[in-house]
Image: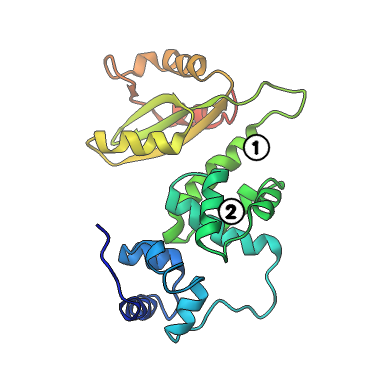
């Protein structure tokens, strides 16, 4: 059961977290630091995060010059991706907008997020921001998929991905429709720290996975999906964006 917080307790927490972060704190950073749920403050005591921050006596998000429409979307969109740990669906965007009136409308997000290089710009924004590490990874995966996507009238559509993960000294090769989700599923089951090395977009996930398993068959670890690979093997796999 969620802890019932009073308005003054929340205001005190906002000041405390902001002090730890150099005087400012975003909604996403505040929620992550305290474990408080968004509905406990927005829609209960305040309509927007800026109103809560202002009442706490802290500077709100003001800009010397107006944000462009695109830049005003990237920051909140990145925060939502980080919290969901995936690219948001239309229903998730609608729900976020309903709960937070300051969040951009679905119409604006849909138009701008479908513009060329949006995923690339989102990845660039998230890079080097520790609180957006998951969003950076997801945006990069989407950017790579878009780069590998065939032009109209060209190759067949992407149906999935063949991924390579590193766990200790071994590499795992498999297929999935969502590399980031698969990484989260696999990671707790492996004894060593696990990282997602590379993904290959493809219209034939099963067939391309089998190709790489055959190619590295001499380096397979018994009857598993793991391989002991060298630098040349890794370079060959990472060279492919679409197959």
Quarter of the image where the N terminus is located: bottom left
Horizontal arrangement in the rendering, residue 141 relative to residue 180 (left or right): right
- Most extreme residue toward the left is 191
Q: Where is residue 93 shown, x and y percent of the image? A: 55, 50
Q: Look at the image and tell me whether residue 126 can be seen.
A: no
Which residue occupies 53% across, 29% down?
Answer: 200
**Judging from the image, what secondary structure is the residue with disc 2 in?**
helix
Which residue occupies 48% across, 60% down?
Answer: 128
Going from the N terminus, do you reach mark 2 or mark 1 first?
2
**Which residue is labeled 2 in the image?**
122
**Which residue is labeled 1 in the image?**
147
Q: Where is residue 230 shown, x and y percent of the image? A: 39, 29
- Name the mark nearer the viewer: 2 or 1: 2
Looking at the image, which is closer to me, 67 or 145?
A: 67
Horizontal arrangement in the rendering, residue 145 relative to residue 114 (left or right): left
**Judging from the image, what secondary structure is the residue with disc 1 in?**
helix
Within the image, what quadrant is residue 191 found in?
top left
Which residue occupies 67% across, 70% down?
Answer: 67
In this view, 58 is above or below 203:
below
């Amino acid at each position: 059961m969620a802890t019932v917080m009073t308005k003054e307790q929340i205001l005190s927490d906002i000041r405390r977290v902001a002090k730890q972060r150099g005087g400012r704190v975003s909604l996403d950073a505040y929620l992550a630091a305290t474990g408080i749920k968004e509905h406990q403050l927005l829609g209960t005591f305040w309509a927007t995060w800026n109103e809560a921050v202002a009442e706490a006596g802290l500077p709100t998000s003001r800009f010397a010059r107006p944000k462009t429409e695109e830049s005003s979307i990237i920051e909140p969109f990145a925060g939502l991706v980080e919290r969901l740990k995936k690219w948001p669906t239309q229903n998730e965007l609608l729900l976020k907008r309903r709960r937070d009136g300051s969040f951009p409308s679905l119409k604006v997000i849909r138009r701008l997020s479908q513009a060329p290089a949006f995923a690339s710009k989102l990845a660039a924004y998230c890079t080097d921001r520790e609180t957006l590490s998951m969003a950076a990874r997801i945006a990069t995966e989407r950017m790579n998929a878009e780069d590998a996507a065939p032009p109209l009238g060209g190759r067949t559509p992407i149906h999935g991905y063949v991924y390579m993960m590193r766990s200790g000294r071994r590499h795992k090769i498999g297929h999935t429709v969502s590399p980031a989700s698969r990484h989260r599923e696999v990671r707790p089951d492996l004894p060593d720290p696990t990282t997602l090395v590379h993904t290959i977009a493809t219209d034939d996930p099963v067939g391309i996975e089998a190709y790489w398993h055959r190619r590295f068959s001499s380096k397979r670890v018994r009857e598993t999906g793991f391989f002991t690979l060298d630098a040349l093997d890794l370079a060959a796999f990472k060279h492919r964006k679409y197959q």
